[in-house]
Image (cartoon, rainbow, N blue to C red):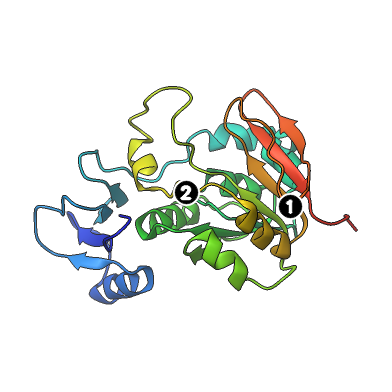
Amino acid sequence: MKTLSPYLALSGHPRTSTAELAALAEWFGFELWTTRPLPADRGGLVLTAGGPRLQVPGLPATPWHPGFTPWRLSRGADDALVRATGARPGRRIVDATLGFGHDALVLRAAGADVVGIECRPALAYLTWSGHASQRVGPPLALRLGDFRDVLPSLPADSADVVYFDPMFPTESTGPNPTWAPVRAAACHDRLDEAGFAAARRVATERIVLKLAPGAPLPVFGGVTPSLVQTKRARLAVYTTREST
């Protein structure tokens, strides 16, 4: 998926018209694939009667799923990310590494207006359609591309918070077949000084970074972060400007 265009294929009898299929392919940059077998050199998206599936060579097709989100939603304001971002109605948050969008779903349920940035077209559409089925909070706004390209294109001071949840190189709990296709498809870019500077231009208040288990608190732009920590999450919070 890194060097070749992702494909868009059909399976079964999805409720997708030819016009809708063409629009999807154009907007997300898919190559329409009408034969079998599916390409073995790249991942893509398969539209089925039960919804879209992420397809990665050698791995089972994966639908979007909410993961632990229902449990997190039951915690409300006690969720670590809600506390770290200050998510609430009217709060403007950019999720710069959307992935499956579980964090974005929690932020939306808290009432925040969320813009999700995702660099993989197949994953972006899968997550967008999954969010559309959940009916919580304001709708998800989607921007397709690498956060290093998208953040500089956003207006300065257009969000209160920019959030990063990088896909960590290894899984802390061991191999998980449910997440393997997502990990294989996702971008694995780390936040660096240039990315932090781009986020700082957009965020009027804070930048939040999810940390790998045991990782030290990184300093970016001369800003030493505070730490929000639970048994399940460690979040570095960088104050960009004073709250008003």
Under mark 1, the amino acid is: Gly
Residue linked to disc 1: 221
Q: On screen, 34 above or below 164?
A: below
- x, y percent for residue 95: 59, 54
Q: Are marks 2 and 1 in contact (CB under 8 Å)?
A: no
Residue 86 visible to an observer of this rendering: no
User: Which residue is pictured at 63% across the width and 71% down the height?
Assistant: 154
Q: Which mark is residue 12?
A: none
Q: Dividing the picture into quarters, in which one does residue 139 lie?
A: bottom right
Which of the two marks, 2 or 1, is nearer to us in this view?
Answer: 1
Q: As drawn, is 138 to the left or to the right of 99?
A: right
Q: As drawn, is 170 to the left or to the right of 69?
A: left
- x, y percent for residue 77: 74, 38
Residue linked to disc 2: 99
* Dot 2: element: loop
- x, y percent for residue 140: 56, 60
User: Which residue is pictured at 77% across the width and 41% down the height?
Assistant: 225
